[in-house]
Image (cartoon, rainbow, N blue to C red):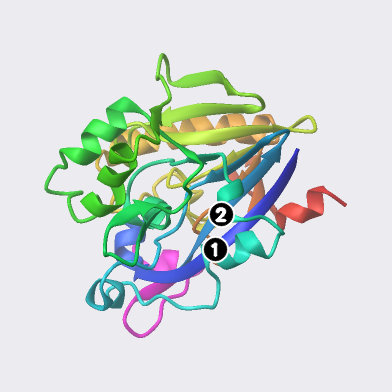
């Protein structure tokens, strides 16, 4: 098995929205804001080469939305999904599976592209796209709070193409879905968000998605204003972080602009950050 971080670009979001009830005087210590109160975030995906499978977890925001839409999120940097996959020597047609942790636009937008005729089609024509039925139904019938994050052009073409399959949620932790990948389901941020656990050389690498956007979100009260059920997020975080610290999980951070991976430790103040590092340091 080989693992490759794929940076798809960076964007900015309001710091208050990203940290909920926590005051700026506290969260700005780890995530400094600009003059408009906007903090920088990455959209970091993960490519997994395992036998005859080439699996991509999440796809970033994509490039098909309008200039007005993108202006809200202040995209910056030169990274792109296509360029960074090809820089590794792979083609878009080599991707066999796309695992979507959830269907908010910054996690799934890059999975659908607009062709020369203006039609929306899967960006990876040979891939199976994986979601789960509970989250899919939640996304195609969105509540008013999340409606702006679930864009039909990012979602419906997956099903229309015939490339959609569901991971069956039989419990909150589903094992043996793929060789070497299990899934934790979390419902605080959105219904049935999937958190992949990758078994790599005796280590557990967890793709954190929006259960833990950054190292700045490790303290329990630091919960995003975007979460639909913030008190449930608190419970899910507390349970997960304790296990991650006890079992020395490696956390792969999708949105942390400064830190790609981290480990945790238990202290007398609860779970706290231990070390930060690049994923490729595990290979050396």
**Residue identifier under label 1:** 82
Image point 23% across, 77% down: which residue? 68
Tell me which segment is drawn in magenta: 22-40
Q: Where is residue 212 in the image (x, y as percent from the top left)?
A: 48, 47
Against 126, residue 166 (above or below) is: above
Against 61, residue 124 (above or below) is: above
Image point 55% across, 71% down: which residue? 79
Against 276, residue 33 (above or below) is: below
Image point 42% across, 47% down: which residue? 210
Residue with the most extreme left position: 144
* Circle nearer the N terminus (1, 2): 1
Residue with the most extreme top position: 170
**Label 1's element?**
helix
Q: Can residue 259 be spotted in the picture?
A: no
Q: What secondary structure predominates along the stretch shown in magenta?
A: loop
User: Does the segment drawn in magenta span residue 35?
Assistant: yes
Instruction: Name the quadrant of the N terminus.
Output: top right
Q: Where is residue 199 in the image (x, y as percent from the top left)?
A: 69, 30
**Residue identifier under label 2:** 92
Q: Where is residue 16 in the image (x, y as percent from the top left)?
A: 31, 65
């Amino acid at each position: 098995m080989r693992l490759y971080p794929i940076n798809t670009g960076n964007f900015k979001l309001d710091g208050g929205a990203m940290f909920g009830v926590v005051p700026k005087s506290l969260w700005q210590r780890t995530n400094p804001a600009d003059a408009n109160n906007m903090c920088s975030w990455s959209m970091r995906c993960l490519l997994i080469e395992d036998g005859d499978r080439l699996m991509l977890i999440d796809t970033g925001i994509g490039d098909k939305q309008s200039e007005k839409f993108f202006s809200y999120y202040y995209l910056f940097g030169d990274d792109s999904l296509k360029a960074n996959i090809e820089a590794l020597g792979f083609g878009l047609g080599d991707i066999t599976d796309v695992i979507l942790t959830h269907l908010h636009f910054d996690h799934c937008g890059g999975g659908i592209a607009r062709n020369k005729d203006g039609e929306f089609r899967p960006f990876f024509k040979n891939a199976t796209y994986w979601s789960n039925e509970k989250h899919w139904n939640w996304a195609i019938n969105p509540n008013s709070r999340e409606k702006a994050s679930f864009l039909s052009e990012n979602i419906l073409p997956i099903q229309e193409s015939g490339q959609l399959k569901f991971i069956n949620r039989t419990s909150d932790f589903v094992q043996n879905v793929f060789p070497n990948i299990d899934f934790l389901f979390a419902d605080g941020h959105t219904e049935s968000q999937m958190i992949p656990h990758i078994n790599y050389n005796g280590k557990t690498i967890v793709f954190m998605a929006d259960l833990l956007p950054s190292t700045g979100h490790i303290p329990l009260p630091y919960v995003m204003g975007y979460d639909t059920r913030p008190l449930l997020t608190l419970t899910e975080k507390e349970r997960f972080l304790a296990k991650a610290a006890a079992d020395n999980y490696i956390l792969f951070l999708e949105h942390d602009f400064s830190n790609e991976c981290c480990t945790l430790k238990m202290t007398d103040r609860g779970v706290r950050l231990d070390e930060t590092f690049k994923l490729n340091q595990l290979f050396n």
